[in-house]
Image: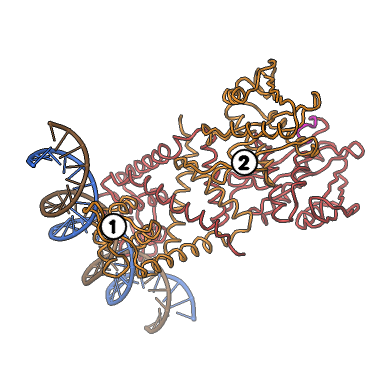
Chain colours: A orange, B red, C brown, D blue
Amino acid sequence: MAVNPADIAQVRAFNRFYTRIIGLLDEGMHKSPHSLSEARVIYELGKRGHATSSTIAEELDMDRGQMSRLVLRLVDQGIVAVLPRSRDRRSTPLALTSEGDALFRHFNEMSDAAAANGLLEPLDELGRRDLVDAMRRIESLLAEPGDEPLILRPHRIGEIGWLIHRQGLLYHLEQGWNGEFETLITRIYAEYEAAPANPPKGLWIAEQDGQVAGSVFIIPATEDAAGTAQLRMLYTEPAFRGRGIGKRLVEEAVRFSRVSGYKRIILWTQDCLVSARRIYQGAGFALVREDKHHSFGADLNGQYWALEL
Amino acid sequence: MAVNPADIAQVRAFNRFYTRIIGLLDEGMHKSPHSLSEARVIYELGKRGHATSSTIAEELDMDRGQMSRLVLRLVDQGIVAVLPRSRDRRSTPLALTSEGDALFRHFNEMSDAAAANGLLEPLDELGRRDLVDAMRRIESLLAEPGDEPLILRPHRIGEIGWLIHRQGLLYHLEQGWNGEFETLITRIYAEYEAAPANPPKGLWIAEQDGQVAGSVFIIPATEDAAGTAQLRMLYTEPAFRGRGIGKRLVEEAVRFSRVSGYKRIILWTQDCLVSARRIYQGAGFALVREDKHHSFGADLNGQYWALEL
DNA sequence: GCTGACTGTTGATATAGTCAACTAACTAGT
DNA sequence: ACTAGTTAGTTGACTATATCAACAGTCAGC
């Protein structure tokens, strides 16, 4: 897909900006008698415990020859020790000496202090939260997805608004729905929050890597017999799709409904939301009826599903 | 204020991560016959049109001596021209030759392509939006505030949720209010959106530097006589405070109410929100009555203010 | 006119980056 | 078991970059 020039400009502006930031933070390191590349090697060795020269060279994008000389210097200074050769006698395993380890801890403290004093300290609590959130977001957008554990948990303060924000935006971009949808879900979430604790209700946030990856809630159905729960607002963040998060959320919602004494779960969805439908089918829901309607600026096919518990 | 170690760890992880990202993007530049520092000087000269050696050296954090040699090389290559000396004959103004300018445009295209293909292209539209938003946020948190123009505009899709999210979080962190507050404002925003177009209503987002800096809305008052408007949900982002944004929002809301034929504006606030109170006073509002109440997990002193138009 | 500060140049030196050649050790295929 | 190809690490040669210090020319303010 064609990339928006304004986005490119913003990304490049950020890269220039952050290059300077990193430069400023690294400046403190220069005061020590060790060069930046030495510090990086020491840091890498300290983090890994032990490693061969080539592993580190690859990790830090250094020339093997340069690395060789650098290691020699560090060994001379008593910072790095050559471990006895392992099975493969080509490679020489390296580790920090106790002196090197002290240096490693010192570097860590310096870097911690630089990050803390240079970046976080001037900010208030909200600013720190925003900064860390934004960094986490950039990392998870640009890095390969790792295998962080998935956590289901209740929502925290501010997250109802977040869910409205994300879903309003998401369905606008993906389905072309207009502001009516956000209006609707604002009311729906308001109703969820206003609902009494009994009959039972429950909302689950799927969290991965410190970020909201999806959500769903269960609320007693209003337009139906007692003993009926309604499953609402299931969604998964695009960046977290394909990891079974929607499935986990629905399973948890069903489990909760069952132990809460509900006999039936109903839900309303649109047939254009294909992956949601698959999840409902997989969880045992059956299609009850369909209704064409015009909502959110689109022609939709609403579907009513139900699961007998 | 003491800095949370987990925040420090996240910031440092991001710095390491982004150092690599920048390294990868700069790699493409190495393929050209010009070094990275040459490219940076050419870029800086191209951006500014003309500049002296020392200006650029300072901007790029380079040694003056190194800069001198680098400029000499570029002049020899016909990329940079020395302009006739200006009033101050110590400094030598520099500019790109037409050849240098072509190179500058080429570098720009390369960098654009690297940012576009390397970072943005793999993302979907939401991902790109999230990335750019996060970058803008980091920049505005860490950079000195500039003097970007303040724009008042209607809300866009997703921003109702955003306002709920931000205010829920903000008043939790600043005032210690609990989830009841978010519950309340979710309902209030739902009511705003559900209200008909007549009698007139209006919501303004204060935008600065591409970010939501504050907001307020006007809605016909329900519990009062016809001809009365209610001003609600005024807030300014902490990062944007002290720039008269709240004042601008209230002024716009009052202006709107006046031209819409309202005779009176009322509002409800809490006396702990000091800066809001000053804005209301400044706009001519008068305190009508106060009420102690316990809400949002706090003992509060609610205030009713009114402005006759 | 004197002082102190600033701009740009040059020399000296150390480190960093790059390329290529080389040895020793290993792997896989026959 | 032999060979070809690969990998780890070292070394030499060379260039670019970084850093510090000294220096001349210029300027502003007193």
Q: Nearer the viewer, residue D11 or A22?
A: D11
The spot of residue A221 in percent (x, y) is: 77, 28
Q: Amino acid at mark 1?
A: Pro
Q: Residue at x 77, y 58 (%)?
A: B274
Marks 1/2 in contact by CB < 8 Å: the verdict is no
Q: Which residue is mark 2?
A: A152
Q: What x and y, as percent, mark residue D13?
A: 13, 58
* Residue under label 1: A93
Q: Secondary structure at mark 1?
A: strand
- The residue positioned 69% from the left and 38% from the top of the image is A203
Residue D28: quarter of image: bottom left
- Nearest to the observer: residue A44 or residue B52: A44
How crowded is the residue under tag 1: few (<14 C-alpha within 10 Å), some, or many (20+)? Answer: some
Left or right: residue A107 compared with residue B140 = left
Q: Quadrant of the C terminus of chain B?
A: top right
Q: Could you say where residue A294 lies in the image, as x and y percent from the top left?
A: 69, 18
Residue C2 higher or lower than A202, as above or below: below
Give how far apart the Cα atoms at labels 1 and 2 are. Answer: 42 Å
When asked about the image quadrant of residue B134, the answer is top right
Query: Mark 1 belongs to which subunit?
Result: A
Residue sitting at x 65%, y 19%: A286
Q: Quadrant of residue A66?
A: bottom left
- Magenta span: B191-196
Q: Position of residue B81 (x, y in %)?
A: 30, 52
Crowding near the residue tagged with mark 2, few <14, some 14–19, many ≥20 C-alpha atoms within 10 Å: many
Res B80 visible? no
Residue kind at label 2, given as amino acid type: Leu
